[in-house]
Image (tube, helix red, strand yellow):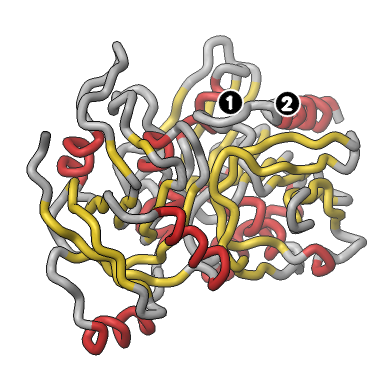
Amino acid sequence: MQEQHKRWLLLADGTLFEGYGFGADKTVVGETVFATGMTGYQETLTDPSYYGQIVTQTFPLVGNYGINSFDFESDRCYLSGYIVREWCEIPSNFRSEKTLDAFLKEQGIVGLCGIDTRRLTRIIRESGVMNGVLTDQKPEPDYWLPKLGRFTIQNAVRSVTCDMPHITKAEPEHFRVTLMDYGYKHNIERELVKRGCTVTVLPATATEAEILATMPDGIMLSNGPGNPAENTEAIETLRALRAHRIPTFGICLGHQLLALANGAVTEKLKYGHRGGNQPVIDLRLDRTFVTSQNHGYAVVNNSIPPEVGEVSHKNANDGTCEGVRYHGVPAFTVQFHPEACGGPQDTAYLFDEFLALMTKEGDC
């Protein structure tokens, strides 16, 4: 049994949790959110969309199948802190390479365990996401609360996007897809490659000319962290690309950015959608799918100009926009993750729709 030391979480509303520390030893401030996935904690830990956040797992036991290097969604952890009810010290899985604690230490991520995660989740559900601090010294509210009130996540996309372009070739190659890296999950690339798409990954800062220079059959807009409206340069680039009629498929942040480029508005949700059990209605198919999601913002339903596009998917719980199909240009986007891994893969058909769209435009 690992020797435990005390660690505290102080929320911006003054609520204090006392638990035990694991992972790295340091003080961090972040936006406290919760995720409802029963599995897939490795994918959560390595999802760049969690940049700047302290993630709470609602499932009570995390780490039971350990950590392996094959299931990562990026090259490292981008979240600020990790909270669980209990972490498993002796994982059991033939693919396991290390424990959750060892991985967090290696990545420099602060962990907190032994608190009532149900109570913390209820607070976030009722009051909304709020900033918090994880620290090994019992926090003084008079010192920390003003700091928590001022904290915001800044330069999120620029902090997670790649520095240089890179190419993953498909054999055989049927299409060339340019993937805009706003904080992409590797499984987006894998899903495209296995369908015969050679993928060129470009940084979020790529210009219209740089994107066109890759001569893409299609453009994939990835997921990513932060407030979508802050990415003004990326939004302008997507607005300029509209005239070139290149088939486009957007996921999560990519969905939001394309909507903003087409005159829509985004809003921050009270506590967001994070986990692998979000029901989404495909309005065209009149079917409900269980989806994996991780986002704190949404496109406002009635803000999409009717001549530009229409809502294609809605969240069955709260009615928020989960997808848009555009008029006059070959483009569609979704708020959820059809490439989900781990998580439900019921909506992977959308990648096939993207290929069909590229085929149709190529035949024109």
**Image quarter of residue 319:** bottom right
Q: Which residue is mark 1?
A: 192
Please name the residue shown 22% across and 43% down the image.
104
Residue 44 or 56: which is nearer the viewer?
A: 56
Please name the residue shown 57% across and 38% down the image.
276
Label 1 packing within 10 angstroms: few (<14), some (14-19), many (20+)? many
Q: Would residue 309 be visible to someone looking at this image?
A: yes
Q: Would residue 233 be visible to someone looking at this image?
A: no
Q: Is residue 209 above or below residue 194?
A: below
| Secondary structure found at label 1 | helix
Residue at the extreme left: 3
The first of marks 1 and 2 along the sequence is 1
Please name the residue shown 54% across and 39% down the image.
179
Q: Which mark is residue 349?
A: 2
Cβ atoms under marks 1 and 2 closer than 8 Å: no
Q: Which mark is residue 278?
A: none
Quarter the N terminus occupies? top left
